[in-house]
Amino acid sequence: MSLIYLMRHGQSTVNVEHRLTCRKLEGDLTALGREQAQKAGEWLADAGINRILHSPFHRAEQTAQIVADRLSLPMTLADGLREMDCGGLEWRTDEDGWDEWLTIYERWQQADWKATFPGGESYRQAYDRFTQVLRSVDTAETTLLVTHGGITITVVPYLCVNASALQRERVLDNTGFVILEPYDDHRFICRAWNQTEHL
C-alpha cells in the first residue's frame, strides 16, 4: 500500500522566538530540531519512502535534508508546501500580531474560503496550491512531504473521508506525522495524525 507521509519540520529558531514567519524563508533548525529530524529519519527507514518533497522554507529544507541523507534519497522542492502567507503580520512576535493572526487562522480552520491575511493569501488560495501538490503525488510511490503545521492543520482534514474524526485533531508537533492513504482522485483516508512515536 502506497502512503503519503506529511511531516512538520523540526523545531526552528523562529519557533523558539515565537515569531510569525509565513513569507521569509529564514529560520534554521535548532539543535533539538536537528535531533528530531534525525529521529524521524530513523523511524522512516523501513517505511519504503520513494520520494521526498519539501517546502522552500529553510526549516523544512533542512529537516528534509537530514531525512534524505538517512534514507539515501534525493529531494525535490515543492513551493506549494510552504506555510500560509500571513502578509503584513510577517516577522511579528507581539501579542497583538498573534491575536490578529489567530482570528484569521480560526476562520481557516472552519474552511472559510474568503478569510484572508492582510496583505497575504486567502484560505482558498492556500487550499488550492497545497492540495495541488498532494494530488500530484504518484500513488504508486510512498512519498514524504516536509511542510508546516498551520497549512497542514487547516487544509488536510477537509481532504479526508474520515474528516469528522479529525475535528479535534488541531495539534501537530515538530516532526509530527500525518499519514494519508489515497482514497480516490481527490480524497484520502487519514491513517494517523501527529504520529510522534519516534521522539
Image (spheres, rainbow, N blue to C red):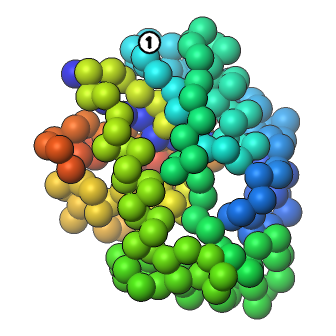
From the viewer's perspective, is residue 129 above or below residue 11?
A: below
* The C terminus - image quarter: top right
Residue 55 screen position, x and y as percent: 61, 44
User: In the image, is 183 to the left or to the right of 89?
Assistant: left
Q: Hey, what amino acid is under mark 1?
A: Asp
User: In the image, is 147 to the left or to the right of 158?
Assistant: right
Residue 5 screen position, x and y as percent: 42, 35
From the viewer's perspective, is residue 167 above or below residue 59?
A: below
The quarter of the picture where residue 85 lies is: bottom right
Residue 70 screen position, x and y as percent: 63, 13
Q: Secondary structure at mark 1?
A: helix
The quarter of the picture where residue 36 lies is: top right
Residue under the point 24% across and 54% down = 160
Pick out the residue farthest to the top: 72
Residue under the point 59% across and 53% down = 82
Q: Is residue 165 visible?
A: no
The quarter of the picture where residue 158 lies is: bottom left
Crowding near pointer 1: few (<14 within 10 Å), some, many (20+)? few
Residue under the point 69% across and 36% down = 61
Q: Which residue is mark 1?
A: 46
